Image (cartoon, grey):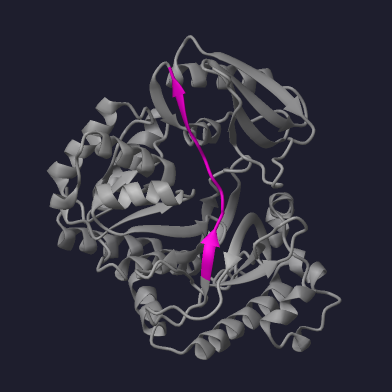
Amino acid sequence: MLNNHIARFTFNAMEYLRGEYISSTLKELLQNQSLTGDQIYEMSFAKCKKLLNYAFLYSPYYKEKLRDIDLSKIKTFDDLSKVDSLTKEDLRENVTKIKSLKPAARIVKAKTSGSTGIPLIFPKDTICRAYHYAAMYRGHSWYGLNIGDREARLWGVPVETKPRLQVRVKDCFLNRFREKEYNLTEDVLNDFSLKLDRYRPQYIMGYGKMLAEFASFLKGQNRKLDHLRLNMVKYTSENMSDAEKSIAEEAFCCPVVAEYGAAETGIISFQCKEGNHHIMSDCVHVEYLDVVGLTGGAKEVAITDLTNLSFPIIRYRLGDIVVPAKGKCDCGLPFPIIEKIQGRSSEIFSIGGKKFHSIIFYYIMKELPVSNGKLLQFRVVQKSKKAFCYQLACEKHDSQIEEYLVNSTQKELGSDLQVSIEYYKNLPRESSGKLKDFVSYKKD
């Protein structure tokens, strides 16, 4: 493993080569913390106006969408509701049209996690990426962490050899390490514990359910990680229940912190030491939408990325539900807060006594061969202990896809598994309206 100073030097060299000036952007975001809430609002709205004008001038999609709107009359964020919201289907079907004809910076490819459908590849410019990373590192700074500090991950691992090797090399240069398996057996979790002792990270990050499983493992063995003196444990992509978080904080002996974001829009909020979720409102604008059937003050969110001129994302409906908070946080940060994030969730499932995280299906789908029919969405249903069904929203049946899914699933999870394929015009959604990528209906 690299030491922290070498890791920071390596990081600076990498960001220079990529044209992503994360360190200087981070300084800007840290300085914003000294502003008042009103000053943050004014700055953010100025960014929004610039985004709207740029989108109208250079994005064919928004040229059409904003054609009948007098942009000069959008004077507050409340007026942004005059612009049609952007759904995931809109984004998927209009990637080329949304892209600016005059990119503000160098363009790179980004990819969604595919948590509610097939992963989406879309353009993102290096200025935007710098803000997305800087927002994350600003959240880390609230816990005394710097760029290059050693990180341990209970996170996704590619299933194919080449991508797995690429991740390993990248982890090395970024001074981090991860557990190499999805199989959450006692041996695997004990191996991760030994790695923590060997490499002494300053923080751990991972999927909420993976971290909860690891915390339960430690509790079952009457062990704690107090000797590591961790600055924080960060969970993202899925929630922890209050009970899971309580067990995790007891096991990890440090703050257990929620990071909320999306690949399309970057970090949306980060939890402070007071436990409040601070919106990164100098990078994104969060709008709350009323939805029939939601109770307890819950709202659907629509996100506007204020930093990506090259691929404007305006009033983007992620499908996530949150409870907005009233008032200010005692920590003194000027950013508005969210009381509760219901967000997205994945699951831990078992096969033959071995536990796996459902994110493995994302990595299987990520390497999917090119289809003859357009594959729009997927869901995996565990029907019994050893029976899994891929539900696909696809224009037509594809034997190559079917063969790949059966072989890859049996390779990763067990050769004796029963793997079936079902085709749908539109996948059935949960009663909440969300489309989960993994559901377990097993009775045994």
In this view, which residue lies farthest toward the right? 68
Residue 99: say if magenta.
no
- Residue at point 74%, 25% (across, down): 423
Comparing 336 with 145, the one in front is 336
Question: Which residues are drawn in magenta?
Answer: 338-351
On the rendered structure, is 164 left or right of 52? Answer: left
Q: Is residue 20 visible?
A: no
Against 304, is 6 above or below?
above
Q: Quadrant of the C terminus?
A: top right
In the rendered image, residue 274, in percent from the top left (x then y), is placed at: 37, 70
- Residue at point 65%, 65% (across, down): 297
Against 15, is 170 above or below?
above
- Residue at point 36%, 38% (across, down): 213
User: Where is residue 234, by image quadrant?
Assistant: bottom left
Comparing 131 with 189, the one in front is 189
In this view, which residue lies farthest toward the top? 416
Residue 350: say if magenta.
yes
